[in-house]
Amino acid sequence: MSVRKLALAITSRVNNLRAHGITTSRLALRSLAMAASISGSTQVLLVDDCSAQDQLSSHTPFQDPFAFDPDFRWFEPIYQADFEDIKPKKRANRGWFATYDRLNLYASRPEGGPDESKLDSGWGNRYDIGYMLREDSGWLMSYIDMSGPGKFEGFDRERLNRLNLDQLTGGGTVEPRFGLIVPRTDRNNPGFNTRFAAIRNSQNVIDFDSFELNKTWRLEPYHYGGMLEPMVGFRYMKFDDLFQRMDYDAGLFSDPTGALAPGAAEIVTTEKSRAQNDMFGAQLGFRYFKFQDRFRYSAEMRTFAMANFQCNTLQTTEETTYYGGTTVTTGDDVLGYFINNTRPLIRDNQEFVFGFDARAEVSYQITKMIELRGGFQLIDIAQGLWRGRLTDPSTRTDQQALFVGGTFGIALNR
């Protein structure tokens, strides 16, 4: 082979190897680029997906109860060293929380009535439930139920037949299932061995309920560890006021049906006027609290403005117990018992209501998530309530109500 042919063969082989290397490199680079592109897209999708989930979780008003990873170690002990190592922001709990408090509040009497400056004791309950997110925002629901005060004044008036001897001796006509004297109006008063008419006149009889739903935020701790939680929300309150007057009269009367001749009888007259106030509106407020070892000091304030839709219903009831004859002795039978209700008188009205709700509490932490607490509460409905008898000339539809007293209860993860 000549030198020229050998050089041409070597040049051709080198060119082939170079072309093959370039092609292989391009394929490898292309594969690496595609892999990098897929990997980058996957990371972007994952990041976008995580960001979307975080944004969704921060804006969704209600979440899965287990989204906060609760450990349910409510009774785990907590020690003094734990308080010294935990900063206030870390010690302020997140996640679901609940509280229960027993209320003993004194309520003001209706204006224009007897002893209107006095306060009467009533008992109730307060329930709080809500949650705080990791983003330091959350929701709070609070419900108050006050079934008092129920202040009556009056006396027990003996009936003409002051006791039922058959009931005491086991005689008389009884019902087969429970063995009680029939009719019911012939029996002695439940829990007593005599018959009497309970005459009761209201002084301050209230039924109060309150429900609120608030959006809350938790701000950064102050220099000395105090924390502020502003809130804004909706509130509904129901305030019912009962006016009652009773009267007892005994003598010779005809029965209301006119079927029986005039004879000895008793008439108990009851006049009831029930004022109902249904209030809807908005409120603004805040909660401030600070830790000191095992103790937490907290204060809350809410101011509200509401529309009040009022209704007052007045009705009179007459209960006639008819004995017959001209005289009645102990143990005489009842010949007739009649109840007559007058047509109810109803009136409606609307008023504007405003006021505030202030609370202050001291709690003592006994385990990781459980606290015992006691405090003070003041609810002032400054105006806009309808209280008292419908037909009273002194009754106003814009009266005030004040609740003030103490509270004690328990808190879970608050």
Image: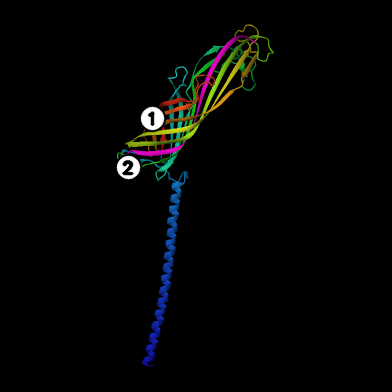
What whole-number distance in Å separates the C-alpha atoms at marks 1 and 2? 25 Å
Is 205 positioned to the left or the right of 187 in the image?
A: left
Is 247 positioned to the left or the right of 325 in the image?
A: left
Q: Position of residue 404 (x, y in %)?
A: 41, 26
Q: Which is more toward the observer, 124 or 249?
A: 249
The residue identified by callout 1 is 375
Q: Of the residues under marks 1 and 2, which one precedes in the sequence?
A: 2
Q: Residue furthest right?
A: 259
Quadrant assignment, res 79: top left
Quadrant assignment, res 255: top right
Q: Which is more toward the observer, 197 or 347?
A: 347
Is 83 positioned to the left or the right of 149 in the image?
A: left
The residue identified by callout 2 is 87
Which quadrant is home to the N terminus?
bottom left
- Helix or strand or loop: what does disc 1 sit on? strand
Q: Is residue 92 above or below residue 405?
A: below
- Helix or strand or loop: what does disc 2 sit on? loop
245 falls in the magenta region: yes
Using the rendered image of the protein, determine whether residue 194 is visible from the camera's viewpoint.
no
Query: What segment carries the magenta color?
Result: 225-253
Please name the amino acid that badge 2 sits on.
Lys
Q: Which is more toward the observer, 253 or 87?
A: 253
Picture disc at residue 349: none
Q: Residue at x 41, y 82 (%)?
A: 16
Q: Position of residue 85 (x, y in %)?
A: 31, 42
- Other residues around mark 2 within 10 Å, as few (<14) / some (14–19) / many (≥20): few
Q: Position of residue 285 (x, y in %)?
A: 41, 36
- Other residues around mark 1 within 10 Å, as few (<14) / some (14–19) / many (≥20): some
Quadrant assignment, res 87: top left
Q: Position of residue 116 (x, y in %)?
A: 45, 19
Please name the amino acid that badge 1 sits on.
Gly
> Magenta: predominant secondary structure element?
strand
